[in-house]
């Protein structure tokens, strides 16, 4: 399953109205642990068919991280 980029504009549709459980990855370009975790999440997203994976850039949409 593809990883979907979530923003304030599509949060309700992609997360709140999702029919599957959603794993949200809150990340930032400057975050070393975020970069280290990225390949693991990408692999999990490819292998999982019963979970939706979404990414939220906290610098672009800080209100979603709150």
Image: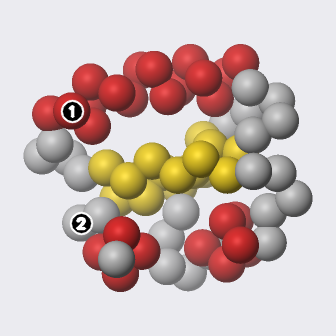
Q: Residue at x 49, y 70 (%)?
A: 7
- Image quadrant holding the N terminus, namely top right
Q: Position of residue 43 (x, y in %)?
A: 56, 18
Does residue 41 appear in the picture of this structure? yes
Residue 37 drawn above or below residue 14: above
Please tell me whether mark 1 sits on a helix, a strand or a loop. Answer: helix
The reply to whether discs 2 and 1 touch (Cβ–Cβ < 8 Å) is: no
Residue 8 drawn above or below residue 48: below
- Side of 50 where 47 appears, left or right: left
- Side of 30 where 66 appears, left or right: right
Q: Residue at x 43, y 58 (%)?
A: 56
Name which quarter of the figure residue 18 lies in: bottom right
Q: Position of residue 53 (x, y in %)?
A: 62, 43
Q: Residue at x 42, y 74 (%)?
A: 64
In three-dimensional space, the C-alpha distance between marks 2 and 1, rounded to whole angstroms, equals 15 Å
Residue 54 drawn above or below residue 42: below
Outermost residue, right direction?
A: 19
Q: Nearer the viewer, mark 2 or mark 1?
A: 1
Name which quarter of the figure residue 17 lies in: bottom right
Q: Position of residue 50 (x, y in %)?
A: 83, 35
Q: Which mark is residue 44?
A: none
- Image quadrant holding the C terminus, namely bottom left
Does residue 61 appear in the picture of this structure? no
What residue is pinned by disc 1? Answer: 33
What residue is pinned by disc 2? Answer: 59
- Side of 4 where 21 appears, left or right: right
Q: Position of residue 25 (x, y in %)?
A: 45, 47
Q: Residues within 10 Å of mark 2 (few under 14, many from 20)?
A: few
């Amino acid at each position: 399953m593809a990883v979907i980029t979530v923003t304030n504009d599509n949060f309700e549709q992609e997360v709140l109205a999702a029919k599957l459980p959603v794993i949200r990855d809150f990340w930032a370009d400057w975050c070393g642990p975020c970069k280290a975790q990225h390949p693991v999440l990408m692999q999990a997203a490819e292998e999982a068919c019963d979970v939706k994976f979404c990414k939220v850039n906290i610098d672009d949409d800080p209100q979603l991280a709150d």
